[in-house]
Image: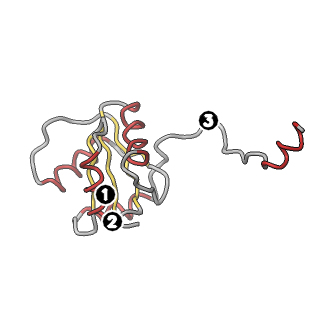
């Protein structure tokens, strides 16, 4: 894990879309599953990292550890335009180590309705329909 992405959005659908866009269009890889973050805490992270006053509050937020370096993540993030505000937190930021300790206690951002099932092997499917 080289960096963290904190995503701030107006609603959960924009949050999901932004997380999807990071992988599909930004070609970033997650170190673990996205975790739900309190919107007020995400706002404080923005103020801490950007060192500017907050313009508007968010209503949904998540944090996800990235396998990519902070420099590469920021560079890729500039090319895409997710529907939410994405903040890349690197180890040089003061809040990074606090977030690393705190991330393990957070719940998953989106729970799965069904458990992930393994697909049948190709040979089984092929023998069944031949």
Q: Is mark 2 on a helix, strand or loop?
A: loop
- Name the front one of labels 3 and 2: 2
- Measure the alpha-carbon separation of dots 2 and 1: 6 Å
Disc sitting over residue 112 in the figure: none
The answer to which of 118 and 37 lies nearer the viewer is 118
The answer to whether 105 appears left or right of 125 in the picture is left
Scheme by which the image is coloured: secondary structure
Find residue 78 and report its horizontal and vertical position in percent: 24, 49
Residue drawn at (33%, 65%), measured in percent from left and top?
69
| Residue at the (26%, 56%) spot, across then down | 74
Quickly name the residue at label 2.
69
The residue singled out by tag 1 in the image is 73
Disc 1 secondary structure class: helix
SS at circle 3 = loop
Front-most of residues 121 and 126: 126
User: Are there few (<14), some (14-19), or many (20+) residues within 10 Å of tag 2?
Assistant: some
Q: How crowded is mark 1: few (under 14 residues within 10 Å), some or many (20 or more)?
A: many
Find residue 9 and report its horizontal and vertical position in percent. Answer: 30, 36
Q: How crowded is mark 3: few (under 14 residues within 10 Å), some or many (20 or more)?
A: few
What's the residue at 27%, 59% (across, down)?
Answer: 89
Quarter of the image with the C terminus in it: top right
Q: Mark 3 points at which residue?
A: 113
């Amino acid at each position: 894990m080289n960096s963290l992405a904190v995503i701030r959005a107006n609603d959960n659908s924009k949050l999901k879309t932004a997380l999807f866009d990071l992988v599909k269009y930004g070609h970033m890889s997650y170190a673990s599953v996205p975790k739900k973050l309190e919107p007020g805490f995400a706002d404080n992270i923005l103020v801490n990292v950007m060192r500017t006053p907050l313009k508007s509050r968010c209503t949904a937020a998540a944090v996800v550890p990235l396998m990519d370096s902070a420099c590469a993540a920021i560079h890729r993030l500039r090319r895409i335009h997710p529907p939410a505000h994405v903040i890349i937190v690197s180890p040089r930021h003061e809040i990074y180590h606090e977030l690393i300790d705190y991330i393990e206690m957070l719940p998953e951002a989106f729970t799965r309705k069904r458990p992930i099932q393994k697909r049948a092997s190709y040979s089984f499917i092929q023998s069944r329909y031949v």
